[in-house]
Amino acid sequence: GGNLITMADMCDLPSLHEPAILYNLRNRHHNLQPYTRVGDIIIAMNPFQWIDGLYSDNVREEYVDRLVWRDGAAGACGDASSHGARDDPKAGLAPHVYETSSLAYRGLAVDDSHQSILVTGESGAGKTETVKIIMSHLASIQSTGAITEDQGTLPRPEPAEEHISHNPRDNCVVRRVLDSNPLLEAFGNAKTVRNDNSSRFGKYIQLQFDVEDSTEAAYKGKTVPSCLLAGSYCETYLLEKSRVVGHEEAERTYHIFYQLLAAPQDVKADIWDGLMGATTESFRYVGGGSGNGDAGADTLIEGRTDGEKWENTVDALETIGIVGDKLRTLMRSICVVLQLGNLEFGADPNNDDASVITNADELSKLASLMGIDAEAIAKALTFRTITAGGRGKESYTVPLRPASAKDSCDAFAKEIYARSFDWLFRTINEA
């Protein structure tokens, strides 16, 4: 006849077993408390709704003040009176993803040690949003002011360079890092049945900080050394290439295809005249007439239309130097992928083991877009080259049947998209 209890930190549960864990998480989720702590681990239960005040400036600054400026200052000064509080600096704070980012920042600035944050979960769990929240918080902590209490106000660390503003978005490095998120999402995210903005690739993001020497900081009277975001590096892996050429009903392929088709007509005309007047029904890979099922060109992603998202993507591309001819070339590669999906293959009337492209008009459009002779494209897609032999290698071509030729075409489209994706992220890293 005991009473069921819930704890903010599940290490405090009297009995740590599966029913107690599930009840604790369920009860906190029901009470709009999406974060639960297990020691240094934060469990996030996606509330699927906006919770007012959860990510307010006051909340953000409270975690930084408690876990970075005050706890860091106590550690740097070796204050024995605060030793008990420093045993668990999270005591009295509600579980929050801000504590993860704040403690990571403190580890960099005060403990002078590398930090690692792992965000994992099933589709729809909120990984993408959590990463954005952590990145934004880490990038802005140095400009966060401390909260004034009875003991006085802890000074905000002075920027190391004059161009560093208290507004993190005023720093071009911070802006480039934060603005890379729309690019990650445009080219690597898609709508699925469970999640409108699901990441379809894995990523490793390294934020690089310039940490002030602790001795120099002490000479300047600082209790916490400055720790400024200096750059970032992103490594991607396991892109879901199959989604480029097909997707389930009620789902979509990658956002960038829809954004491009929703761009202003003059922009589309400048990229490729084949985009003029084109919609999602104009291209089979996106949803036009091939059983892919169009989840809707009017689908809102995070409350915004594809046209609005296009503007965000173009702005983000500009911050890493992709403008003018570079932007046009990148988008034309996306157009090549779209147009490849419109090619149709049928049996060669003169050879049952061979195939031909049956819609010459679509092939002509592709040839014009790629700047390659139509016959050369047709041969590349309907024949395969085999090389045999040792020193005196011999090569010969073998015709492909329609199904195999279609597979070859799809593989070509997937490879173009994957290489464009990789080039984009190399450019982000070099920016």
Image (cartoon, rainbow, N blue to C red):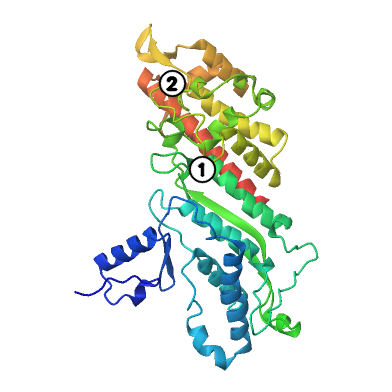
Look at the numbered disc 1 and give the secondary structure of its residue: helix
Looking at the image, residue 123 lies above or below residue 153: above
Closest to the observer: 271 or 9?
Answer: 9
How far apart are the two marked residues, 2 and 1, measured between alpha carbons?
31 Å
Residue farthest top in this picture: 350
Query: Do the residues bearing badges 2 and 1 touch, measured as CB atoms within 8 Å?
Result: no
Left or right relative to 22: residue 344: right
Q: Using the rendered view, name the quadrant where residue 403 is placed.
A: top left
In this view, which residue lies farthest toward the left?
Answer: 1
* Callout in the foreground (2, 1): 1
Q: Residues within 10 Å of mark 2 (few under 14, many from 20)?
A: many
Q: Is residue 180 left or right of residue 408?
A: right
Image spot of residue 426 (x, y percent):
61, 47
Across and down, in percent, residue 6 comes to: 34, 70
> Compared with residue 266, is residue 169 higher up or lower down, i.e. above or below?
below
Q: Is residue 8 above or below residue 238?
A: below
Outermost residue toward the right in this view: 162
Q: Which of 35/127 is in front?
A: 35
Query: Residue 311 location in percent, x, y?
Result: 65, 37
- Quarter of the image where one finds residue 43: bottom left
Q: Residue at x 42, y 57 (%)?
A: 120
Residue at image mark 1: 188
> Do we see residue 60 in this rendering?
yes
Q: Quadrant of the N terminus?
A: bottom left
User: Which corner quadrant of the image does residue 132 belong to?
Assistant: bottom right
Give the image location of residue 66, x and y in percent: 57, 76
Visible residue check, residue 203:
no
Left/right of residue 101 with respect to residue 244 in the rendered view:
right
Q: Residue at x 31, y 72 (%)?
A: 5
**Residue ID for mark 2:** 383
